[in-house]
Image (cartoon, rainbow, N blue to C red):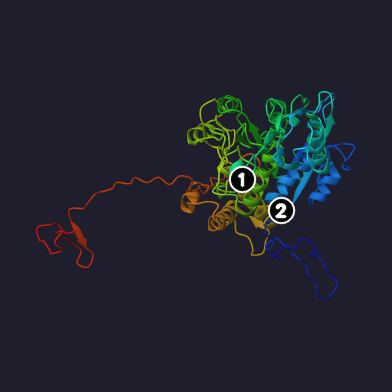
């Protein structure tokens, strides 16, 4: 009996008609690639279990699970502003033992001489506070407190004080170091945007323009352990201290127990953001080197917190890479994220700085035509090979994203078509229908899969792939096939360089109808060479 059945017994005596269903030639890869947002929750306000991932389908769910105004809830606000189409989970973590909340003080020192509106921005969110010329400094402090308290999803609480008069104390709703990244500023859009401080009003903000004094970074050991073997493809991690990055890069790394390692084959990417001056970012970038991590460089004057930048970056990356992992992310807009103010000279990175950041392992963003930030280059922190020499193998997010898609496509095809096969050498004669494979059969399947991947725009140069593909039976273990798989990943159009070699006037014209040169008078000149 040449046809191999998996279920119907070969010695079956019961008549008549029996059918065994075999899906091995029908299945297609399923793209279940969720994002994972990692951040601090407010334990007393959220109903989620700390350190355990939970699926989130709306902002209302995020608020209920993690507490309104929490770091993680605010991350979901940025995520949903950029992506409402893909699956996303939240991983709530609790503050480190002894963590302290960041604080800041607003002081109204002189009341206004005329009515107006205070355009106060907390973490990039507008809090509008109307004032009148009859208001005292304490009246205005109370009004600011009431306006902030009315916004339940702000990351701070406010308390008015009278000693000294006119003070408002802001306290981050969640504990930890990232509270120090909550900005406090006035008139983000400036007079051109209709924002101006009421006449006569004088108020002071936190000295650095940010809350300060927050301490403590979560310990991610339990949270990472609880991820198990489920795929979380795009991780938004708003912590860039060495311990946090090391913990997550070990989980998503290439070693045996990492998600990119041969034992787990789960894959994935880590996205983050870091705020600092250009020189400090260059220095920091040179301390990192990992192909699975992409950290976006942010100007110090941006009002939006880095945890919202990280969530927005992850959100747009997921939306694009799920559709096509090989297309560059450049020009994708990060909605509802605020750049450094346009009227603050030198506050935004320039072309020289974008180049330097990209050369030192940092992803870059730049202003779009709508004054919203957009992804410029999705650089990873990878810069050096194992011997410390400059290397570009994993420089861009698209490289590993494309490779993960190829491997998953190949794994699906191989495990579907050859789940229970016998293995023989090439040239073995066996009956049709036998569940036997040879190196040539497997090689043909790999070439077929590569051809389809090329058709789908993931790879190129199929003939070179075929020439370099090796499929052989192991010389020690006769039950093992070894494959050298050499895909040529498709590249991206990232630079369009033009040499504009202009003339003020050509000496000769070409008549396209006769294919010969003519003089400037338009009369055919046989002395001029034909082209």
Classify mark 2: residues with Cα within 10 Å, few (<14), some (14-19) or many (20+). some
Q: Which mark is drawn over residue 209?
A: none
Tell whether 345 sits left or right of 101.
left
Quadrant of the snapshot with the C terminus: bottom left
Query: According to the image, label 1 marks what residue?
Result: 193
User: Of callouts 1 and 2, which one flags the residue occurring earlier in the amino acid sequence?
Assistant: 2
Report, in whole angstroms, how far the alpha carbon at label 1 lies from the one at label 2.
34 Å
Above or below, 10 against 248 in this view is below
327 or 308, which is in the foreground? Answer: 308
Residue 349 at x, y percent in the picture: 54, 34
* Picture coordinates of residue 476, whole percent (x, y): 63, 39
Front position in the image: 137 or 483: 137
Whether residue 86 is situated above or below residue 118 in the rendered picture:
below
Q: Is label 1 in a helix, a strand or a loop?
A: helix
Residue on which the image places disc 2:
86
| SS assignment at label 2 | loop
Which residue is farthest bottom? Answer: 16
Residue shown at 56% from the left, 35% from the top: 348
Query: Left or right: where does residue 362 sit relative to residue 106?
Result: left
Q: Quadrant of the N terminus?
A: bottom right
Residue, far left:
527
From the top left corner, tell me how far across and down residue 355 is, in percent: 49, 34
Can you tell which quarter of the image residue 241 is in?
Answer: top right
Query: Around disc 1, counting alpha carbons within 10 Å, would you say few (fewer than 14), some (14 to 19), or many (20 or more)?
Result: few
User: In front here: 166 or 287?
Assistant: 166
Is 11 located above or below residue 477 in the figure? below
- Residue 92 in percent (x, y) is at 81, 39
Foreground residue among 466 and 442: 466
Q: Closer to us: mark 1 or mark 2?
A: 1
- Discs 1, 2 touching: Cβ within 8 Å: no
Q: Using the rendered view, name the quadrant where residue 344 is placed.
A: top right
């Amino acid at each position: 009996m040449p046809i191999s059945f998996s279920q119907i017994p070969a010695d079956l005596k019961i008549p008549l008609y029996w059918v065994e269903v075999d899906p091995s030639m029908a299945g297609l890869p399923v793209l279940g690639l969720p994002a994972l947002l990692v951040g601090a929750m407010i334990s007393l306000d959220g109903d989620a279990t700390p350190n355990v991932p939970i699926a989130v389908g709306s902002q209302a769910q995020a608020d209920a699970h993690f507490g309104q105004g929490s770091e993680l809830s605010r991350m979901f606000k940025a995520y949903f502003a950029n992506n409402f189409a893909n699956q996303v989970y939240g991983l709530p973590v609790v503050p480190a033992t002894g963590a302290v909340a960041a604080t800041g003080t607003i002081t109204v020192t002189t009341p206004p001489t005329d009515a107006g509106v205070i355009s106060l921005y907390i973490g990039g969110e507008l809090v509008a506070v109307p004032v009148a010329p009859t208001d005292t400094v304490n009246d205005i402090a109370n009004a600011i407190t009431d306006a902030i308290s009315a916004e339940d999803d702000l990351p701070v609480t406010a308390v008015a004080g009278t000693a000294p008069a006119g003070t408002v104390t802001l306290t981050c709703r969640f504990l930890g170091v990232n509270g120090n990244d909550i900005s406090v500023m006035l008139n983000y859009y400036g007079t051109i945007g209709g924002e101006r401080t009421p006449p006569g009003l004088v108020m002071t903000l936190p000295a650095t323009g940010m809350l300060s004094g927050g301490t403590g970074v979560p310990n991610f050991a339990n949270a990472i352990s609880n991820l198990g073997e489920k795929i979380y493809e795009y991780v938004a991690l708003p912590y860039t201290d060495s311990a946090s990055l090391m913990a997550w890069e070990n989980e998503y790394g290439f070693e045996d127990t990492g998600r990119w390692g041969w034992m787990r084959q789960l894959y994935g990417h880590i996205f983050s953001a870091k705020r600092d001056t250009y020189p400090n970012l260059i220095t920091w970038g040179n301390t990192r080197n990992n192909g699975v991590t992409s950290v976006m460089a942010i100007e110090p004057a941006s009002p939006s917190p880095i945890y919202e930048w990280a969530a927005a970056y992850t959100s747009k990356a997921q939306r694009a890479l799920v559709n096509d992992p090989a297309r560059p992310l450049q020009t994708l807009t990060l909605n509802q994220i605020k750049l450094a103010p346009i009227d603050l000279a030198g506050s935004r990175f320039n072309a020289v700085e974008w180049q330097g950041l990209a050369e030192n392992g940092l992803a870059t963003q730049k202003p779009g035509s709508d004054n919203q930030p957009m992804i410029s280059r999705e650089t990873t922190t990878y810069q050096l090979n194992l011997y410390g020499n400059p290397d570009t193998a994993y420089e861009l997010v698209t490289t590993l994203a494309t490779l993960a898609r190829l491997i998953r496509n190949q794994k699906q095809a191989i495990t579907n078509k050859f789940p229970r096969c016998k293995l023989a050498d090439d040239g073995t004669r066996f009956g049709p229908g036998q569940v036997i494979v040879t190196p040539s059969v497997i090689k043909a399947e790999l070439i077929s899969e590569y051809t389809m991947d090329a058709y789908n725009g993931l790879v190129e140069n199929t003939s070179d792939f075929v020439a370099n593909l090796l499929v052989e039976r192991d010389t020690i273990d006769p039950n093992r096939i070894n494959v050298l798989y050499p895909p040529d990943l498709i590249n991206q159009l990232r630079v369009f360089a033009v040499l504009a070699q202009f003339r003020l006037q050509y000496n000769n014209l070409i008549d396209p109808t006769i294919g010969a040169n003519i003089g400037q008078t338009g009369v055919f000149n046989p002395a001029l060479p034909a082209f």
